[in-house]
């Protein structure tokens, strides 16, 4: 009997995850408003978050795929790992119902939620980066898409965020928007750990000097 793909299980697992995560965070955060709950849910079911959970299970090692896909790093690709995790949730649901899904997956969800809240991953990373960049550098970051991989129906984008000509973060996503958000989160994490790179600080200082000089010339 030929093997089928996991698309039907992915479809079911996606719906089960949406319900389970919604119920979980609704009970976990008793006083959170709709907006915050929506942000938290989006952060927990997005591609990179589910791919992280799949990696924790080493799920990539159990996928059957073509040689070309495997040679191109398919076992490590966020999109494929996310879909495999959704399929696994769907399979557990079919086998044991929602109670089985909760027993198997809720401990991992709780750890993921703590990680998200601790690192503010549910907040709008682009807005947070822009606020910090404008406050500390007086510069607005810019974004660019540098790569698009995979077939059109499951495209994965890579985006970079820049200050001037310097790349300060990069990230991947199933859309250009989510890739840009991932790149902003990466930049925020780097700045939090290491501060702004010296070349970025020098560029910001030069830009400030130019703006002050231009202003003095205009007033004169």
Image (cartoon, rainbow, N blue to C red):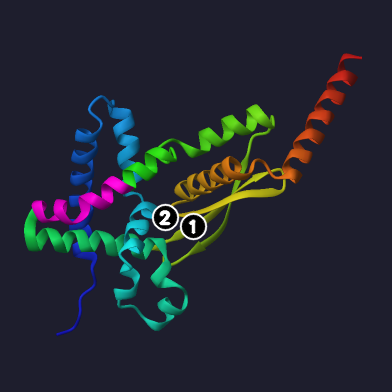
Please check the rendered image and state whether residue 102 is part of the magenta-colored stretch, yes or no.
yes
Which residue is nearer to you in this view: 199 or 3? 199
Image-based side of 121 in relation to 101, left or right: right
Q: Is residue 196 among the parts visible in the rendering?
A: yes
Image-based side of 59 in relation to 217, left or right: left
Q: Residue at x 18, y 51 (%)?
A: 16
> How far across and how far down the image is residue 36, in percent?
33, 30
Q: Residue at x 29, y 33 (%)?
A: 37
In the image as oriented, which residue stretches furthest toward the right? Answer: 220
> How far across and how far down the image is residue 150, in percent?
44, 67
Residue 120 drawn above or below residue 81: above
Q: Secondary structure at mark 2?
A: loop
Q: Are marks 1 and 2 in contact (CB under 8 Å)?
A: yes
Q: Residue at x 28, y 28 (%)?
A: 34
- Segment tinted magenta in the rendering: 98-111
- Mark pair 1, 2: CA separation: 6 Å
> How far across and how far down the image is residue 191, in percent?
60, 42
Image-based side of 149 in relation to 27, left or right: right
- Mark 1 vs 2, N-terminal side: 1
Dot label at residue 93: none
Image-based side of 141 in relation to 39, left or right: right
> How far across and how far down the image is residue 73, in percent?
45, 73
Q: Tell me the chief SS of the magenta region.
A: helix
Residue 60 drawn above or below residue 148: below
**Where the N terminus falls, by quadrant?**
bottom left
The residue tagged 2 is: 174
Q: Residue at x 87, y 14 (%)?
A: 219
**Where the C terminus falls, by quadrant?**
top right
Residue 119 drawn above or below residue 74: above
Dot label at residue 157: 1
Q: Residues within 10 Å of mark 2 (few under 14, many from 20)?
A: many
């Amino acid at each position: 009997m030929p093997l089928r793909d996991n698309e039907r299980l992915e479809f079911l697992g996606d719906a089960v995850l949406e319900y389970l995560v919604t119920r979980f965070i609704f009970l976990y955060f008793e006083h959170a408003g709709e907006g915050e709950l929506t942000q938290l849910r989006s952060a927990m079911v997005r591609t990179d978050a589910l791919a992280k959970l799949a990696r924790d299970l080493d799920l990539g090692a159990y996928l059957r795929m073509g040689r070309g896909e495997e040679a191109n790093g398919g076992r490590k690709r966020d999109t494929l790992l996310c879909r495999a995790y959704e399929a696994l949730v769907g399979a557990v649901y079919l086998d044991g119902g929602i109670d089985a899904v909760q027993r198997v997956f809720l401990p991992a969800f709780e750890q993921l939620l703590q990680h998200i809240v601790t690192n503010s991953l549910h907040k709008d990373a682009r807005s947070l980066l822009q606020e910090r960049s404008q406050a500390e550098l007086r510069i607005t970051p810019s974004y660019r898409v540098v790569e698009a991989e995979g077939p059109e129906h499951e495209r994965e984008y890579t985006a970079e965020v820049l200050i001037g000509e310097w790349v300060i973060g990069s990230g991947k996503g199933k859309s250009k928007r989510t890739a840009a958000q991932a790149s902003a989160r990466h930049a925020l994490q780097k700045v939090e750990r290491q501060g702004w790179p010296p070349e970025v600080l020098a560029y910001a200082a030069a830009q400030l000097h130019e703006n002050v000089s231009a202003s003095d010339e205009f007033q004169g």
